[in-house]
Image: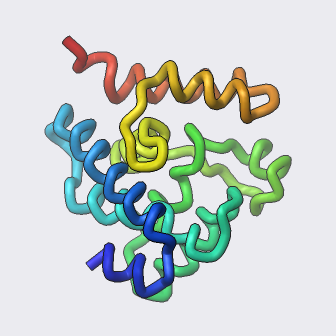
Amino acid sequence: MEIELLRKENTPENVIDHCEAVYKKAMKIASNFDNVDGDLIKKGALLHDIGRSKTHDITHAIEGVEIAKKYSYSDDILNIIERHIGAGITEDEAIELGLPKKSYVPQTLEEKIVAHADNLVSGSEEVNLDFVIKKWQRRIANSDENIKKLIELDNELIKPFEE
């Protein structure tokens, strides 16, 4: 159903491929936990970039929430869509980026899993943490705080389960 919705909203095919890859990565991460809502992760991961049907800038998260509201998705899904950007954007960072003044930091386990899975997928390919850090260092001015949050997510969601 979510893939059909992405197509109905004219989401570019490469973004749909990305959403499917994020879903697969998110489910791998979720398998480390007993107390996670797999259906919520599935829907949130598949819809996290639906706002890219309207814009490719950071406001795609805000656009995505508005689109998902039209289809009566739950607040849990809306929060995943809104809070998936980066490794979490604080209220102060949101103001600097021109977003509405609020925190976009993932709160629930499901929100964190989708946000981090999104970080660990480039296009439709899985990438490792070092790849993401290097990319952010090239693309984001003053990336140290963002990278710190990225590493914290990785330490919470992946590192304890690596062999």
Q: Is residue 7 above or below residue 141?
A: below
Which image quarter: residue 29? Answer: top left
Q: Nearer the viewer, residue 134 or 31?
A: 134
Q: Position of residue 136 (x, y in %)?
A: 65, 30
62 left or right of 157 in image: right
**Image point 58% across, 68% down: which residue?**
52
**Image point 29% across, 55% down: which residue?**
41
Q: Can you see residue 107?
A: no
Q: Is residue 46 above or below residue 153?
A: below
52 left or right of 33 in image: right
> From the image, which quarter does the N terminus lie in?
bottom left
Q: Nearer the viewer, residue 10 or 95?
A: 10
59 left or right of 68 in image: right
Which image quarter: residue 45? Answer: bottom left
Q: Is residue 66 above or below residue 110?
A: below
Q: Position of residue 79 (x, y in %)?
A: 48, 61
> From the image, which quarter does the C terminus lie in?
top left
Q: Is residue 56 above or below residue 113?
A: below
Q: Residue furthest top?
A: 163
**Image point 44% across, 69% down: which residue?**
13
